[in-house]
Image: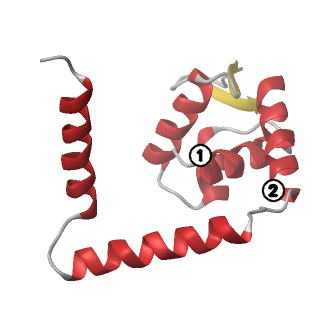
Amino acid sequence: MSVEKRVEILRILEQGTMGVRGLSGALRRRTENVIRSVNELEARGLVSRRRAPTKGKGRPRHLLSTTDLGRDFLRAYDALMLRPLRGRRADMERAAYEGDYARRLASRGFSPFGLLLELNGFVGDIDSPP
């Protein structure tokens, strides 16, 4: 699950407890996808689930809420989003050069990744004893 999807779910649950149906409505996503996402968040300790009292017969209802770890996750995410990305000019120029080189290789029918794996194999052969 993407970080953005986690943050979106945690932000909604941070406003108050909610059931899966309410969450899927707020997210405008299919219930099955929301259940899968909630299960993953629960396994990571970011969301807790508690059983709500039922009225009569039927499937038990669960209410979801953000855990302390989930709130810490949101605070850390917000702090990182406020930090500007910084890079040296030389690093940016090198990245542009390497990107252009990879594009030229691909235009000539070579796979940059395949060439990297081949080079890695050569280096592995040099380092290993005969």
Q: What residue is shown with label 2?
A: 81
Q: In this rendered view, identify the residue nearer to me: 125 or 97.
A: 125
- Give the residue at x 57% y 35%: 38
Mark 2 is surrounded, within 10 Å at the Cα level, by few (under 14), some (14 to 19) or many (20 or more) other residues, namely few
Q: x, y (%) of residue 9? A: 68, 46
**Amino acid beneath label 2:** Met
The x and y percentages for residue 96 are 53, 75
Q: Quadrant of the C terminus?
A: top left
Q: Give percent across and percent down for residue 23.
A: 65, 48
Q: Is residue 105 above or below residue 122?
A: below
Q: Residues within 10 Å of mark 1 (few under 14, many from 20)?
A: some
Eyeballing the image, is 25 above or below 105? above
Judge from the rendering whether residue 104 lies leftward or rightward of residue 77; answer left or right: left
Residue 20 can be seen, yes or no: yes
Disc assigned to residue 21? 1
**Which disc, if any, is residue 80?**
none
Front-most of residues 25 and 89: 89
Disc 1 or disc 2, which is closer to the eye?
A: 2
Viewer-proximal residue, 128 or 81? Answer: 128
What amino acid type is highlighted by mark number 1? Arg
The answer to which of marks 1 and 2 sits earlier in the sequence is: 1
